[in-house]
Image (cartoon, rainbow, N blue to C red):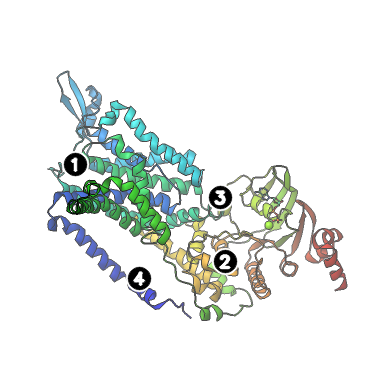
Amino acid sequence: MSATIPAPVGRLRAVWDRPAVRHGLLALLTAAVLLFPFVEGDDADIDSLANAAAYVALALGLNIVVGFAGLLDLGYAAFFAIGAYVYGVLSSFQVLPAWSPFWQPFAALHLVEKINQGGGDLVHFTLSFWLALPLAAVVTAGCGVLFGAPTLRLRGDYLAIVTLGFGEIVPIVARNTPYLTNGAAGLNGVQAPHLFGYNFTVQATPYYYVGMALVALLIFTSIRLRDSRIGRAWMAVREDETAASAMGIDRTRAKLLAFAIGAAFAGAVGVFYVAKLQTATPDMFGFPVSVMILVMVVLGGMGSVWGVVLGAALLSLLQSWFLPDLSEWLHTLGAAIGNDWLQQIDLARSIELIFGILLVLMMLFRREGLIPAARHAPSLDFAAQHVQGVQRGGFDGELAATALALPEPGRGNLLEVRGITVRFGGLTALNGVDLVVPAGGVVAVIGPNGSGKSTLFNVITGLVPADSGSIRFAGAEILGLPPHRILAKGLARTFQNIRLFANLTVLDNVLIGQHARLSTGAFGAVLRPPRTRAEEARALARARSIIALFGNRLAPRAAQAVSYLSYANRRRVEIARALASQPKLLLLDEPTAGMNPAETLELAEQIRSLHALGLTILLIEHKLDVVTQLADTVIVLDHGEKLAEGRPDQVRRNEEVLRAYLGRAAREALDAA
Ligand code: ADP
Ligand code: MG
């Protein structure tokens, strides 16, 4: 059975998905970029394209922060400024300390030279452009970490405000430290790059090629990062921070990394831009620049590498090519019809207004940008949706054993919760609760709504702090550890209110579940050594085989965005994602809620087959027949306290439980049965 895709879309996708087509297009684009200066002799046009390259590169960097990791940064130009001043100051006549023997080794490395300006020997900084590119990237990445560490706790609007402030502060500092920056007048005498003795001076063509090379490098880096463990972690954080950390992602680290890499891109572009202009003034890095880069990202498509390239190139050329041309045309028109206003109009000066109008139009008609980031498989058609029957009998034991590769259950008590108390202000959600889950066992927690069951899961998985008590997992205390470290120890969960990464595919969700079991870092993701390739291939194969366990419920939908799935299928994906982390203990919070009786039975059998594979399970469940069928031990919570504990049949007959939980009617029904 295959998914049916509307014919024209399917054909276009099939064409694009052929590597030969993509490589062919890329080769054409490269050829066009390389040949442009030979075809077009006009220096001004080449210069416009070199500037466009700088903006494309900046937009690519901001795309990592905003598009990949979902952090709204309104002060991105600050990093652009820092990179620019690193090179500007270290390769100009701005700062000229007195010469001393201290500088001798630097002179030997050609970083400085001794000059004489009347009054005595001075130090002239002569940092090479090529050295400045990586240096500025490292410095700005460091600034990104320094700035991000205290602020990235904030989300959404708050982060936007703080970054806005940072974006304002940097140019102000530049304006007010004339010793370093020459203030508003700008740096003078910034050195032009040299390559093998060739001086770039103020010609457009060499900058054009350097700019294009920079863009190519950043596109490559962006794509490699996006399609890696790192990129998936960013997108998980973007979609749902809490779920991301519960699935093993260190969210602070992921966000800092995005911030640092985004800043590094801006730093390198700053060097390029300053070298090209051979000056730097604080005005070049103000708020309008940050906004313009953001508009480029939004216009192109947040998170879409090629979309951002297109968006930034279009807006940049709009400013330098189309608007001046259009203005001139309007002047001619104005002269012809004798209209003064038309003769004086200068559209390039209304660029902010034009950006605003473009943005509004995009939001109205193409919210996901020119080239949307997500290319999901469309939903299955009616027939394909209805071929599958209920799958009885649980998972295929052998397939599941290889796909899940679960660790050994071990011996003794896997989880020991002692005297856990959790208060939310005046409300005591849990009051001195004890709970023991033996290795290889299935324990169910039942209780009326609001009795603290989900809070118990939250405290075990580190999402909610406890006021007192202790939680030991496999013999070690885990209370107080952050969620991602608890997952790494082998404790995975699902959420009562399903917290999947809604805009990512089923496959990506399950891949993210493996995050803690994989090790690729940022450098590995970009350089992709054989080890990383092998790890990625293994992860993909595992994700596919875990999805395959759910048969035609999930397998035909692996490439669909989770938000397209039915409720029951989302529950299955959440379980698949948790299983992907190779847990020792699986916590399921009302896994059958919202499922019909047939689906409930199907899932109960699957949980039983997980148990048969040795997985220890802690389950919150309302459906008593499911509990009776699965659990060895049942714990009843009421108002945050443990009311009863025992085998399912014992608990079912317990007077207090019947009163608190089932109510009189159910009790009478039970008696009658
Ligand atoms: P259950 O899962 O058994 O239905 P919960 O654990 O979700 O119950 O909730 C227990 C009690 O704690 C409820 O009264 C709920 O309103 C409260 N509660 C849960 N989480 C929070 C929170 N983050 N802040 C404040 N109160 C909460
Ligand atoms: Mg609950």
Under circle 2, the secondary element is helix
Of the numbered discs 2 and 4, the one sitting upstream in the chain is: 4
Within 10 angstroms of label 1, few (less than 14), some, or many (20 or more) residues?
A: many
Report x, y in % for residue 37. 15, 55
Task: Between label 4 and label 3, give the one nearer the viewer.
Answer: 4
Q: Is residue 190 above or below residue 348?
A: above
CA–CA distance in space, label 1 to label 4: 40 Å
Earlier sequence position, callout 1 versus callout 4: 4
The answer to whether the residue labelled 4 contacts the one labelled 3, judged by CB atoms less than 8 Å apart, is no
Q: Which tag, 1 or 2, sits closer to the chain's start? A: 1
Q: CB atoms at circles 1 and 2 under 8 Å apart?
A: no
The answer to whether the residue bearing label 1 lies less than 8 angstroms from the nearest atom of ligand 1 is: no
Tell me which corner region of the image, top left, top right, bottom left or bottom right, holds residue 497: bottom right
Relative to 204, residue 649 above or below: below
Foreground mark, 3 or 1, reads: 1
Residue bearing the label numbered 3: 485
Query: Is 154 left or right of 464, judged from the image as shown?
Result: left
Residue at image mark 2: 570
- The residue carrying mark 4 has its beta carbon less than 8 Å from ligand 2: no
Q: For the residue labelled by badge 3, is the local secondary structure a helix, a strand or a loop?
A: helix
**Mark 4 residue type:** Asp
Marks 3/2: CA–CA distance: 25 Å
C-alpha separation, residue under disc 3 versus residue under disc 1: 47 Å
| Position of residue 456 in the picture relative to residue 231 (left or right) | right
User: Quick one: label 3, few (<14), some, or many (20+) residues within 10 Å?
Assistant: many
Badge 1 is on which residue?
193
Viewer-nearest of discs 3 and 2: 2
Asked if residue 525 shows in the view, the reply is no
Structural distance between the alpha carbons of marks 2 and 4: 27 Å
Numbered label attached to residue 17: 4
User: Residue flagged by tag 3: what amino acid is it?
Assistant: Arg
| Residue 507 coordinates in the image, percent (x, y) | 48, 66
